[in-house]
Each structure stands twice: as structure tokens, then as C-alpha cells.
Image: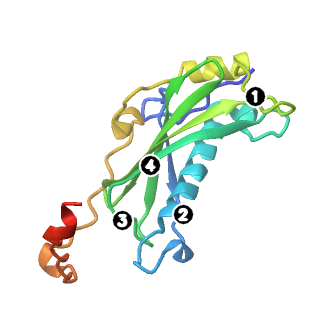
Amino acid sequence: MARARAARGAEGVVSAVHRTVLPVRWSDQDLNRHVNNARVVTLIEEARLSAVAAWLGEDGVPDPARPRVVVSLSLDYLRPIDHGPELTAHVWVAGLGRSSYTVAYELRQHGRAAARARTVLVQTDPATGRSVPLPEGVRSVLAGLVVPDPDPEERAGAAPEPERGPEPSPESAPAREPAPAPDPVTARA
């Protein structure tokens, strides 16, 4: 049977919010000198695998004999993620169904949220590809970890990440050409 091994706060209380530091590599950047949007999806996957392994132990390790597949991913990019500064992921179980569970994420850098995401994972039968109920041991552990909308820092028992400096001012941003005005003739069509 699976046992929860979630992060423990300062008082030794098990927390449902898993916190992990993710490496941001030089090769993760794109031509805009920030982490590429597709690479953010991979960082979220790495955070999920770390959290599920912490929560479920051996039952959380990917296994072709009992696959759990991502059937939905939503991702909000809140600000660019830079190379270099530490990127911290807060991960929690946001919902639980018969054969599925929802994992929520917040990626933080410079002391602020940079991205928020949710994935829905479904337990499947490898022979048919159809959904099947989650194993009872997995389901019971996940049921004890559901946190619909936590404050990740408070729930993880972690001190807030320090501010890393001011945001760039609008004056220091590169100048942009204004968008052309719409043609009044074609705009009516």
C-alpha cells in the first residue's frame, strides 16, 4: 500500500504541497532570452514526477504495466522565466476522481509566480487504453492530499522566497513599433 511522504514543514507536519527546485539550463532559453514556452511544460513534468514520487513512493514511479497518462494540461504564463535564478515549483493535488486526479502547479522565480498550471492524469488499462479505477492504495493517499486552492508557501511551511530585485521599468524596455491602425473599409467586413 502507498504511503504519503510529502514534504514536512518546520513542525514535522506532513504537507500536501510538494516544493522542489528545478534547474534552468542555458539551453532552455529561446531567442527572446527567456525559457521557451515548450520547455516550461517539461519543467512542470519534472516537478510532477518529483511530487508524485514523494507522495506515493514506489506507487508513484511510472510503470508501463499500470500507466497514468496526462489527458489535459492548462498552463498560464504569468511572466518570463530567466536562466540562472532559482526556479521553485509548488505542486499539489487539486482534485480526485474515480480513475483520475488533478495536479496543480505554481512555478516561482524572483519571489513571484511565473507560471501556473494544471494537469489531469488518468489511470489506464495498458491492454485497452481505457480508464480504470485508481488503485485503492494510491487513491487513499491522494485523497488525504487534496488541497483545492492552497497558498503554496503557507501550506508547505516554507518561508516566502526573497525578492530578487525590482522589475524592469517601462522606460528600460525596448521600444516597440505601434501596431498599424485597422483599415476602416476592411474592418467592416
Query: Identity of the amino acid at label 1?
Result: Arg
Q: Earlier in the sequence, mark 4 or mark 1?
A: 4
Identify the colour scheme used.
rainbow
Say which residue appears at 47% left-offset and 35% top-offset: 17
Tell whether 101 sits left or right of 53. Answer: left
Number of labelled discs? 4
Sequence-wise first label, 2 or 1: 2
Instruction: Report how far apart the C-alphas of labels 2 and 4 lie in the structure.
Output: 12 Å
- Return the x and y of residue 108 as percentages of the image width and height: 38, 54
Report how far apart the C-alphas of labels 2 and 1 lie in the structure. 29 Å
Say if 1 sits above or below 11 in the image.
Answer: above
Judging by the rendered image, the residue that carries numbered circle 3 is 80
Which of the two discs, 3 and 2, labels the residue nearer the N terminus?
A: 2
Residue matched to label 2: 39
Distance between mark 1 and mark 3 Cα atoms? 38 Å
- Of 101 and 4, which appears nearest the observer? 101
Mark 3 residue type? Pro
User: Residue 39 at what x, y percent from top left?
Assistant: 54, 63
Are there few (<14), some (14-19), or many (20+) residues within 10 Å of tag 1?
A: few
Q: Residue at x 83, y 30 (%)?
A: 128
* Amino acid beneath label 2: Arg
Q: Is residue 151 left or right of residue 91?
A: left
Contact check, label 2 and label 4, Cβ < 8 Å? no
The C terminus: image quadrant: bottom left
Residue linked to disc 4: 75
Tag shown at residue 130: 1
> Element under label 3?
loop
Q: Is residue 75 above or below residue 188?
A: above
